[in-house]
Image: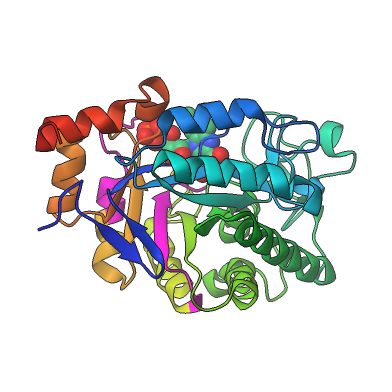
């Protein structure tokens, strides 16, 4: 059975370790969204031969989908060279590197983007301060799919080894999936298949642009898990069905997380998404990555050996201790 330091590969993405630095926004981007020297220092401190893959933080594909001032963007040619420097630096430090691409949709703020945020329907997200979004007409959905595809191509040009679509945490792709945000009465809503249509079409549009061999990851919010009375959101059974559709649409690796409820459920103990990852892995033919309170190398190793997941994300653990993965290697394999 493979362990935490067994090699792993999917398409051209060949990793020396199964530890992944999951995407974590640092808020350190330049005004135009370009990665900065501070990013370089942050990521280089954590990349190493012991971290198989670094997934660089969510980067907006279009200015209308920008979440915050310091968010990274991959929306224009102007930021390409800074991305290329970041990807090259992470490669030199010993890790493979992917970029997460995202559109905040209804989670954006009009005070930042200068217009009303866009969303599936005119229904605010179930969170404090949410604005009533402007419902997206079908013509604009076409533009957004193209924005994702162009952003992915820029990531390829910048030298990233893979791209991850952000379909979790209540951002645009996750909003489409959730009945709490998507009240559309056209073909992009109403049923699970309708709500999944825009995310699936976005995957196909990205796949068509990057070609059949480029590794494509998808971070899926498998369920919304909001507390009552809002527990009418996306359910785990539905999320698992969508996971299968994503694989059929061309996703190579599924990154498990939460939907409108975010990356951390209120009662999240150690390895809180491992049961979801195990369920997804059991019904999928593509590999699965999971993060969420996995700070103990023994738990991470066991999760791989028991077949609960193929890759383990260690976010806050690596943020707090950049040497986490090297220490895990020493603990599990001894000095090498
Ligand atoms: C400061 C911070 C920023 C984050 N930014 C992102 C992000 O850009 N994209 C994303 O999908 N998840 C983001 N997350 C969620 C993490 O990727 C991860 O799923 C979560 O922290 C749980 O894993 P952990 O317990 O190992 O930290 C963020 C989490 C934190 C703490």
Asked if 16 appears above or below 150 in the picture, the reply is above
> From where the camera sits, is residue 229 visible?
no
> From where the camera sits, is residue 334 visible?
yes
Image position, residue 240 (x, y; %): 38, 64
Asked if 175 appears above or below 328 in the picture, the reply is below
Q: Quadrant of the N terminus?
A: bottom left
Using the image as rendered, state which of residue 136 and residue 61 is in the foreground. 61
Q: Which residue shows up at 47% across the image and 69% down it?
A: 251
Q: Is residue 85 left or right of residue 2?
A: right
Asked if 97 appears above or below 25 in the picture, the reply is below
Image position, residue 280 (x, y; %): 31, 61
* Residue 100 is covered by the magenta coloring: no
Using the image as rendered, state which of residue 112 and residue 260 is in the foreground. 112
Q: Which residue shows up at 64% across the image and 28% down it?
A: 37
Magenta span covers which residues?
249-277
Q: Is residue 296 left or right of residue 75?
A: left
Q: Is residue 295 left or right of residue 55?
A: left
Image position, residue 262 (x, y; %): 50, 39
**Which SS does the magenta portion mostly show?**
loop
Chosen colour scheme? rainbow
* Residue 263 is covered by the magenta coloring: yes
Q: Is residue 21 left or right of residue 330?
A: right
Q: Which residue shows up at 29% across the image and 28% down it?
A: 324
């Amino acid at each position: 059975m493979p362990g935490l330091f067994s090699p792993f590969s999917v398409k051209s993405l060949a990793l020396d370790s199964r530890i992944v630095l999951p995407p974590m926004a640092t808020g350190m981007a330049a005004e135009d969204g370009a990665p900065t020297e501070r990013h370089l220092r942050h990521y280089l401190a954590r990349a190493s031969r012991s971290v198989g893959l670094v997934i660089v933080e969510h980067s907006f594909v279009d200015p209308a989908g920008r979440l915050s001032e310091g968010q990274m963007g991959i929306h224009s040619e102007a930021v390409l060279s800074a991305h290329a420097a970041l990807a090259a630096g992470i490669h030199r430090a010993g890790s493979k590197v992917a970029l997460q691409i995202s559109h905040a949709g209804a989670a954006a703020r009009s005070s930042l983007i200068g217009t009303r945020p866009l969303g599936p329907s005119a229904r605010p997200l179930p969170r404090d301060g949410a604005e009533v979004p402007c419902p997206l007409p079908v013509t604009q959905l076409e533009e957004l799919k193209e924005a994702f595809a162009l952003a992915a191509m820029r990531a390829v040009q910048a030298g990233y080894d893979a791209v991850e679509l952000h379909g979790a945490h209540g951002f645009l792709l996750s909003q489409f999936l959730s009945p709490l945000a998507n009240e559309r009465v056209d073909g992009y809503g109403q049923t699970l298949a309708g709500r999944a249509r825009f995310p699936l079409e976005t995957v196909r549009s990205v796949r068509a642009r990057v070609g059949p061999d480029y590794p494509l990851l998808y971070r899926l919010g498998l369920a919304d898990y909001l507390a009552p009375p809002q527990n009418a959101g996306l359910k785990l059974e539905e999320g698992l069905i969508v996971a299968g559709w994503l694989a059929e649409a061309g996703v190579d690796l599924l990154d498990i997380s939460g939907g409108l409820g975010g990356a951390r459920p209120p009662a999240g103990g150690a390895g809180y998404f491992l049961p979801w990852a195990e369920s997804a892995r059991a019904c999928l033919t593509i590999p699965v990555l999971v993060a969420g309170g996995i700070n103990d190398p023994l738990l991470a190793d066991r999760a791989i050996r028991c077949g609960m997941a193929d890759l383990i994300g260690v976010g806050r653990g690596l943020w707090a201790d950049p040497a986490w993965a090297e220490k895990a290697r020493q603990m599990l394999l001894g000095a090498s």
